[in-house]
Structure formats: C-alpha cells, structure tokens
Image (cartoon, coloured by chain):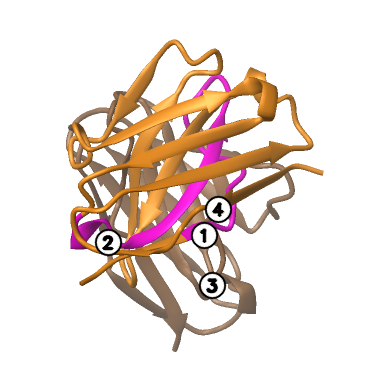
Chain colours: A brown, B orange
Amino acid sequence: EIVMTQSPATLSVSPGERATLSCRASQSVNNKLAWYRQTPGQAPRLLIYDASTRATGIPGRFSGSGSGTEFTLTISSLQSEDFAIYYCQQYNIWPPLTFGPGTKVDIK
Amino acid sequence: QEQMVESGGDVVQPGGSLRLSCVGSGFTFNNYGMHWVRQAPGKGLEWVAYVRNDGTKKYLADSVKGRFSISRDNSKNTVYLQMNSLRAEDTALYHCTKSRGDYYFGFWGQGTLVSVSS
C-alpha cells in the first residue's frame, strides 16, 4: 500500500497571501496525484489531477507541481472559500487508492 | 446536470447490517466505474470499494474485506454497498464517486451517514 503524508498539518495564512502545501508518497506514483479541497459540511472538490492539471472550473490561483514522491499545491492568493482542508490522493498503484491525512488551512 | 444521491445510512448496532445505495443521473452510468469513499467524523478520507462499469471487477479495502461487498445494477443506474458485521470503526459518512480512465474523483455525492453504536 502506498502511504501518503501531508505537511504541515495546519497552515495559518492571511487572506490574499500565498499558501504552499506538500504531499509525499511512500513510493513513486509518477504523476498520478490529485488534490481536493473540502469545506465544512461539503463533499470534497477536485482541484488538480495528474499532479498539475486543473480540473474543470478551478481558478488559476491553484497550481500543482511535482512527480514521483514529492508534490506541491500552491494557492497564489487565498480567498475566503480557500480556508478549508486539502487532501492529496494517489491513483498510480491500487488497490487501495490512498489519501493523505489532510492539511487544514486556517485564517491567520 | 450530474448527480449522485446516496441513501440507506442509519444507526445500527455492532454486528448488524446495512445496504447503501447510490443513484446516478445526468451522466451515462454504465460508462463509469463507481467507488465508495468514507469519512469518519472529524477524520480524513478512506477509499472503501470499487466496481468496474460492467460489474466484472471489484475491489475492497482491507479494512472491510470479508464484511462488505459492492455491486451495481446498470438498468437502475445504482451502485450498492452491502455492509455486514458492522463495527464501531465503520461509523462514517459514506460518499459514492465515479471514475473513468484514471482513478481520481471529479464528482462526489453528498453522502449517507452510518452510525454503529450500541
């Protein structure tokens, strides 16, 4: 099973500032990495797939990078709806499909 | 407009059973693999089960193997999760999701809540 880890667990950022979130896989997942944002009471929303491709309707302030075992999600200028929990997920080797434990982005 | 609506969640005693259903609409159901992903209260996401679009391949997470099963009825645009021998640690919001080609999740249902408690 591929184990996903995320850092930091919590990130405190001011609105309008940049946020950088990290995700690491226990072995290479090539570029088969997705990012999701989850706000309270809502289902997760796909932001990025294939490590760097924005999903339909996702604004340009979200960007993903990385390959192999190290990945980054960058939010260039945080908006109110971006204060949420972010999960990464690998889909290169499965079953099982595995998620990271999440990074909570809260207001500084 | 795509939609997936889960149902069947309930409060059940340890050792009990439930069957969850998820009805899809607004997309060609039999073109998609279907998954169940759960989220325990205040916790992260855990993939639970998958069934191929034609029902011929199924996978389950180790944590539910031998207790849960997944099936689908394409004539009803519905995927099911049969849950037996339920444990307290199965308490979660169960979402259905779909995939085609690669196995990330572009659309999620809102979920149905399963609570296992005596």
- Looking at the rendering, the stretch of residues picked out in magenta corresponds to B87-112
Which disc, if any, is residue B7? 4
Query: Closer to the camera: disc 3 or disc 1?
Result: 3
On screen, residue B52 above or below B48: above
Q: Is residue B90 magenta?
A: yes
Please provide percent x and percent y for residue B48: 33, 40
Query: Which SS class for mark 3?
Result: loop
The residue that mark 3 highlights is A41
Chain bearing tag 1 is A
Earlier residue among tags 3 and 2:
2
Say which amino acid is labelled 1.
Arg
Q: Residue at x 36, y 75 (%)?
A: A11
The residue that mark 2 highlights is A7
Chain bearing tag 4 is B
Which disc, if any, is residue A37? 1
Farthest residue, direction bottom:
A108
Say which amino acid is labelled 4.
Ser
Chain bearing tag 2 is A
Distance from Cα at disc 4 to Cα at disc 1: 24 Å
Chain bearing tag 3 is A
